[in-house]
Image (tube, grey):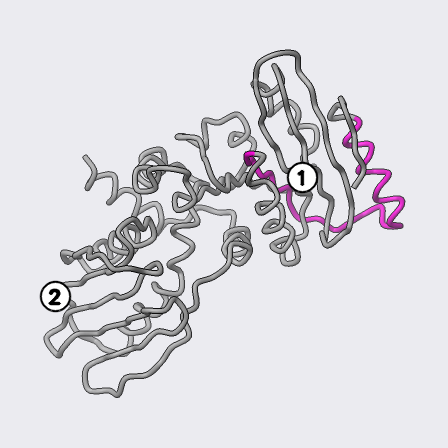
Amino acid sequence: MIELTNTTSAKIAAEFVRGRKRAGSPAMGMVMTLVIVVPEDDAEDAMRAAREASHEHPARALGVILGDARGAGEINAQVGTGAGWTGETAVIRLKGEVVKHASSVVLPLLLPDSPVAVWWPTDAPADPAADPLGALAQRRITDAAAAPRGKSRALHVQCASYVKGNTDLAWTRITPWRALLAAALDQHHVKVTGASVTAERISPSADLLAAWLGTRLHVQVERANSGGPGITEVVLETAEGPIRISRPDGKLANYESPGKPDRPIALKRRSLPELLAEELRRLDEDDVYAEVTKRLRKAAS
C-alpha cells in the first residue's frame, strides 16, 4: 500500500494508474466500484470482508473513513493493487471541512460506465438514498443487525426510507430460510393457518422473516424469543400438522413435516463476506424486499 498524505482525488487516481502499470495490467477487469463508509474502529474488519467479496466481484474498493469535521480539510489515503484484492483499493481518511463534502472526493474515483454500490457496515444514515455518498450509487447496502445501538429501530428507520436500490444485510441473512420454507410448501400443498418465528429477542432478520411470511401466507405470524444464535425455529401450522425447521446451534437444522421422517439440513449462519457477495450479485430492485418493508412500515404506524 502506498501512503499519500494531505492528498487529493487526482493524486489518488494517478496512483491507481501507476499501480496498474507496476502490476503489468493496464486493464484490471473491474466490474463495479464499491464504496465502504465506515468508522475508523470498524475499518479493518469491513475492508477484510470487502476483500473476500471482491474474489467474486472484482471491484475498485474505496474505504471512506469520516473523521472530525472541525478544522481545515485534510485527505490522507492508502492506495494499492493486489495484496489479496482482485481490483484496486484505497482507504481514504477525511478530516475537517472536507468531511462535509465526501462525495466530491469520491466522485472522481468512480469507475466510468460501471455500477456503484455503497455499503455502511455499521452506522448507516437514516435515508441512504438522500445521503451524498448514497446518491452516487445504484445499490445502497445497510446492516441493521450491526447498528451500534437500537437494532430494531435501525431496521424500521431503513424500512421507512426505502427506495429502489436500498437493501439490508438483515434481509440477506434469511435467504436460506426463505428458500427452505418455499421448498417445504412446494412439497406439501396445504393451506397454512398460522406461523411462528423464534429467535433472539433483538433480531432484525427474524422481524423481516415474520413479515415475509405474513405477506406470502396472509396469516398471523407470532414472534417468539429464544437464546439464539439468530433465528432458531420457524413453524408453519397446517391441517395435516406442523412444518417445523429448528436450528438451535446456528449450523445444522432439523426439518419436520407431516407424514415424513425428520431429516437434518445444513443451515449454517453465513459470514459477512458471503452476505456482501450475495448482495452485489444483483443491482436491480428487490421487489420482495420492497413489499416486506411496506408491511413493516404499516405495522409500525
- What percent of the width, then of the height, locates residue 110? 67, 35
Q: Nearer the viewer, mark 2 or mark 1?
A: 2
Q: Foreground: 153 or 181?
A: 153
Q: For mark 1, what is the residue?
A: 113
Q: Residue at x 59, y 21 (%)?
A: 99
Is residue 87 covered in magenta? no
Local secondary structure at mark 2: strand
Q: Which mark is residue 169?
A: none
Q: For mark 2, what is the residue?
A: 193
Q: Foreground: 8 or 211?
A: 8
Left or right: residue 39 compared with residue 246 = right
Give amino acid for label 1: Asp
Closer to the N terminus: mark 2 or mark 1? 1
What is the span of residues highlighted in magenta in the rendered image? 11-39
- What percent of the width, then of the height, locates residue 193? 12, 65
Q: Residue at x 71, y 38 (%)?
A: 90
